[in-house]
Amino acid sequence: MDTATGPLLTPIPSRTQFVLEAIKHGILTGRLSPGQPLVETELAQQFGVSKTPVREALKTLAGSGLVVIGQYKGATVRTVDAAMAREVYDVRLLLEPEALRRAVVREASLEDARQALERADRAADRADRSLANRDFHRALYLPCGNPLLSRMLDDLRDQAALVSTVAWAASPSWDREAAEHQEILRTALAGDADGAARLLHDHIGSFVRRAFPAETEQTP
């Protein structure tokens, strides 16, 4: 890119990217639990790298909302409470159904969403199913035709997945959500843009109400 039209983006070094993806996978599959310390020296030894790529990976994960870096306590996996869940899901409720509605109106391909549901059905464990469900939601909004809207939802994606991981660990609701996913996709493939958006809105809203019932009763 010409510097006259915008800044050059510096790619993340490969070792940092490797560490970042490994830690993220651990968080989003529940292997690293909320509040768990992320000690640089231990992680560096685990991944066979110096502390520098670990430190940079943790900073990036803090920027995406998965890690908290305290002045005295160091880095920990972000904890999930009702306030955090409400903030993330309120924005999803505003943006994600509209993105799906636009994708259906555009008659965009939803083949990736169908494949993600098949992967979820074949998942061998909670981790694989969680990742497949995450991909399903992204495949619904990605072809909306508005790159900025897609990026905004991508920015929320990791935090939403963290909320889901914590909620599923406390109260698994795979079967119900799988059925809702199938109905959302069926309606979208039938070309009913408003109906698919409405089902997705209900699906997102009901999940957070089930996961945090007492604290979300007053959610608009």
Image: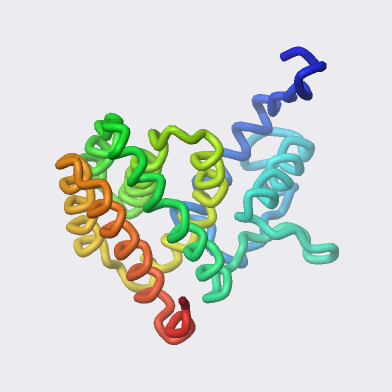
Camera-nearest residue between 106 and 85: 106
- For the point 40% across and 70% down, the residue is 208
- For the point 26% across and 59% down, the residue is 199
In percent of width and height, residue 183 lies at 17, 53
- For the point 43% across and 78% down, the residue is 212
Image position of 215 with respect to 54: above or below: below
In percent of width and height, residue 96 lies at 42, 51
Q: Count all numbered tags in the image, as a single digit.
A: 0
Camera-nearest residue between 199 and 177: 199
User: Where, by quadrant of the figure, is residue 132 drawn?
Assistant: top left
Q: Which residue is at the far right?
A: 71
Residue 185 relative to residue 135: left or right: left
Camera-nearest residue between 208 and 73: 208
Residue 15 relative to residue 100: left or right: right
**Type of colouring:** rainbow
- Position of the N terminus, as image quadrant, is top right
Residue 171 relative to residue 38: left or right: left
In percent of width and height, residue 33 lies at 53, 62
User: Where, by quadrant of the figure, is residue 148 drawn?
Assistant: top right
In percent of width and height, residue 42 lies at 69, 49
Image position of 91 with respect to 171: above or below: above
- For the point 46% across and 53% down, the residue is 95
User: Where, by quadrant of the figure, is residue 116 drawn?
Assistant: top left
